[in-house]
Every structure is written in C-alpha cells, then in structure tokens.
Amino acid sequence: MSETSSVNPQSGNLEPGVTTVQIALRWGDMDALGHVNNVQIARLFEEARVRAMSGWFGGERPAEFVTLLARQEIEFAAVLHYSGRPVTCELWVSRIGGKSYDLGCRLTDADGGVSALCETTLAVLDMASGRSREIPEAMRTVLEAHLGEPVPFRRR
C-alpha cells in the first residue's frame, strides 16, 4: 500500500494502490458525548467507498449486475472528535475472490491519527437472476490495480 492517489469521480482514476478520499464532517455527526457517532463513522466509510469506486470505474456501472454489501467489520481505534477540517479515508482492495471482493479502509482524523479501520465484503449480483455471479474480467482488472494488504485489525 505504498502508492496513494486522490479520487476524482469525473476522471475515471485508475492509478494503482491506495485511494485517498477526504470528507468533511458535519456538526450533526456528533452524539451527546461530543464525538462522532459510530453510525456516522459507518456512513463515512460508505461515502468514501462510493467516491473511490466511482473514480475507479469512471462513474459507469454495467446494467447487468450490481455489487451488494455482504459483510462489514469496523474496529474503532480512537475517538473521532468533530473538526472543521476533513477526515481522510484511505481505501484499497484487500481480497479478490470469485464472486466477491473485500475493500480495506483506514479513517484518520485531521491530525493523521487513526480513528477506525474497516473491511467491507462486496458481492457481485446478476440482476436478471438475482444470484451471485463471477466478477467480470474488466472489473477484476480494475480491482487488481488497487490490491493491497489485509486490513491490520488488532485481534487478527
């Protein structure tokens, strides 16, 4: 995971390695304890995933299949406090299987401290049959360009 690229959804960014996405926090992301709520952190990961994949695939999605979230694991490493400065999500592909793949993500605060790690499994679904299908070769090529290490969860 040595290479880093910023995502531009309009450019179809296919640079290899880690993709970096910056996201502004909203005042409403805080909970009663004054830190960013765990549900909002899941939403930050979702936003980063959507932006990165839009950049990787050029905003185009073939009509014959979709990807569905099959599993998500989040490890909260440190409290994320609200800041007017954006947080950073670094995304990469951590595993490519036959019909699914995993995305790794690291969320850091405005000062670079790791707030959370995430791994999301996305399954490829055939729209006509409603069943899982093999990852198309063109999609696999893009995913391989972003392949990196497994997510460094503490308990693994």
Image (cartoon, grey):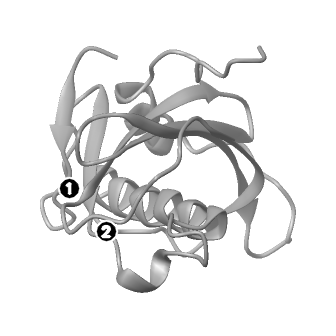
Seen from the viewer's position, the closer of residues 69 and 46 is 46
Q: CA distance from mark 2 to mark 1?
A: 7 Å
N-terminal-most mark, 2 or 1: 1
In the rendered image, the vertical position of residue 28 relative to residue 5, given as above or below: below
Q: Is residue 99 above or below residue 57?
A: above
For residue 138, side relative to residue 110 (left or right): right
Splitting the image into 4 quarters, where does residue 25 fall? bottom left
Instruction: Return the x and y of residue 9 as percentages of the image width and height.
Output: 22, 64
Disc 1: CA contacts within 10 A as few (<14), some (14-19) or many (>=20): some
Please state which of residues 154 and 83 is positioned toward the viewer in this rendering.
83
Q: Position of residue 156 (x, y in %)?
A: 77, 14
Secondary element under disc 2, as helix, strand or loop, is: loop
Give the residue number, with chain letter if any, for mark 1.
Answer: 12
What residue is shown at x 27% (from left), y 35% (from top)? 112
Q: Quadrant of the N terminus?
A: top left
Kind of residue at disc 2: Gly
What residue appears at the point 44 percent right and 23 percent down from the top-left corner? 147
Pointer 2 residue: 59
Q: Is residue 121 left or right of residue 108?
A: right
Q: Is residue 27 above or below residue 76?
A: below
Outermost residue toward the bottom in this view: 28
For the residues labelled 2 and 1, say whether their Cβ atoms are less than 8 Å apart: yes
Query: Residue most toward the front?
Result: 33
